[in-house]
Image (spheres, grey):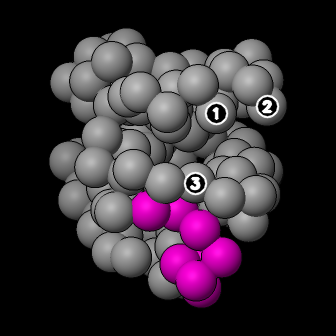
Amino acid sequence: MTTIADTYGSMTVLTIEPALAKDDAETFRRTASEQVRAGGRWFVLDLSKATYFDSQGLEDLLWFQEQVEGVGGIAKIAGLKGNGRKIFEMVRFDKRFEIFDTVHKAVRDFH
């Protein structure tokens, strides 16, 4: 898995591809932790290229949300499609996260 962090002013977009699963947990957590330690508070997780989630990946999203909220920030989700969106609805993550169709809409919602 690749987790790419792009910072735009006070906003950080973390792009995750192609999956968020057990084998990817360390990479995601390391990148995410670095961004929070660097002072990031406003995050959009771009999942438009993520085609697979497992239970560890979903736990990692909750962990990340706790880390961000612990420093007074917000994490939003963007780009969920197909099965990814269905999984989020089944485990009720659509109640825990604000979910947007695109990164642009999620970023714009911060303003």
Q: Is residue 84 above or below residue 63?
A: above
Residue nearer the viewer, 70 or 89: 89
Q: Specify which label sits upstream in the sequence, 2 or 3.
A: 3
Q: Position of residue 65 (x, y in %)?
A: 69, 47
Q: Distance between the residues labelled 2 and 3?
A: 12 Å
Pointer 2 and pointer 1: residues touching (CB < 8 Å)?
Answer: yes
From the viewer's perspective, is 94 left or right of 38?
Answer: right
Camera sees residue 67: no
Q: Circle 1 sits in a helix, a strand or a loop, which is it?
A: helix
For mark 3, give the secondary structure: strand
Q: Along the line of sight, which residue is nearer the eye, 108 or 102?
A: 102
- Give residue 98's position: percent from left, percent from top: 57, 20
Asked whether the beta carbons under mark 3 and mark 1 sit within 8 Å of each other, the answer is yes
Instruction: Tell me what residue is drawn at x 20 percent, y 48 percent.
Output: 8
Q: Residue at x 49, y 33 (%)?
A: 83
Write down the residue under mark 1.
Answer: 87
Few, some or many residues within 10 Å of mark 2 (<14, 14–19, 20+)? few
Q: Between marks 2 and 1, how big is the CA–CA gap? A: 6 Å
Q: Position of residue 111 (x, y in %)?
A: 33, 15
In the rendered view, does 59 fall on the left or right side of 105? right
Q: Quadrant of residue 86?
A: top right
User: Which residue occupies 34% across, 63% down?
Assistant: 18
Q: Mark 3 points at which residue?
A: 53
Image position of 74 with respect to 14: above or below? above
Q: Which amino acid does label 2 sit on?
A: Val
Q: Which contiguous range is marked in magenta?
A: 19-26
Q: Main secondary structure of the magenta part?
A: helix
Identify residue for label 2.
Answer: 91
Q: What amino acid is labelled 3 in the image?
A: Phe
